[in-house]
Amino acid sequence: MTKEQDGEPFGYGVVANVSRETAHGVGGLEIRQGLKHFAPGTKVWIAPTRWGVFDEVVVAGRHRGHGRRYVTLATKLRFLENFRVSGVHSPALLRALSRPGPGVDRDGGLWTAEQAEAYAAFNNAHRLEVRTDGPDGIRAWVSDPPPMELVHQDTTYHLAHFNAYYARYSSQPPPVEAPTP
């Protein structure tokens, strides 16, 4: 008897949905419904990666135009939302997650339950990359919308600009407007 017949999953995977609206182009000003290959809200499974690629992931999901067949491709992490953990019960999905690809971990395309929970929690809480002024830039992530101030090593950084891709912070306080008479 196989695991599928017993009702037990083959393992665990991180699941997300394609965002209803995705930002493309310069500054993220071009708004599209879903992605070229996935409709808005499509459930996709994220393959574990071999190295720490922060902004791009390999996903398996049902293609817009190919019915029930799973396709595997790379997409930007910012185009996904609602990360969660789910059991992998389908042999076809397991094969799709295990396909060779750039940076994909070939350990069967599955996560441990602990890895999946941590990855889903991190991506639900942190959505925008932080960029700071100065030579010692911070490598961090913040929520969307980003907070007005960040404190790092006793330095307060103020939000200077943000768009669909990142939040830029400055160590200089924002200018104060003169009161109108």
Image (spheres, rainbow, N blue to C red):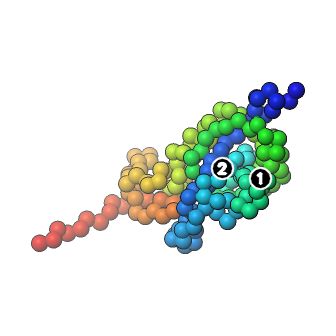
Residue situated furthest right in the rendering: 1
Residue, disc 2:
43
Q: Earlier in the sequence, mark 2 or mark 1?
A: 2
Q: Is residue 9 left or right of residue 56?
A: right
Q: Secondary structure at mark 2?
A: strand
Q: Residue at x 64, y 38 (%)?
A: 85
Q: In the image, residue 175 lies at what x, y percent?
A: 29, 66
Query: Of 107 and 16, which appears nearest the observer?
Result: 16
Query: Of 169 and 142, which appears nearest the observer?
Result: 142
Task: Give the amino acid at mark 2.
Answer: Lys
Q: In the image, residue 155 lies at what x, y percent?
A: 40, 50
Residue, disc 1:
68
* 51 vs 116: above or below: below
Front: mark 2 or 1 = 1
Q: Residue at x 37, y 54 (%)?
A: 148
* 8 vs 173: above or below: above
Q: Quadrant of the N terminus?
A: top right
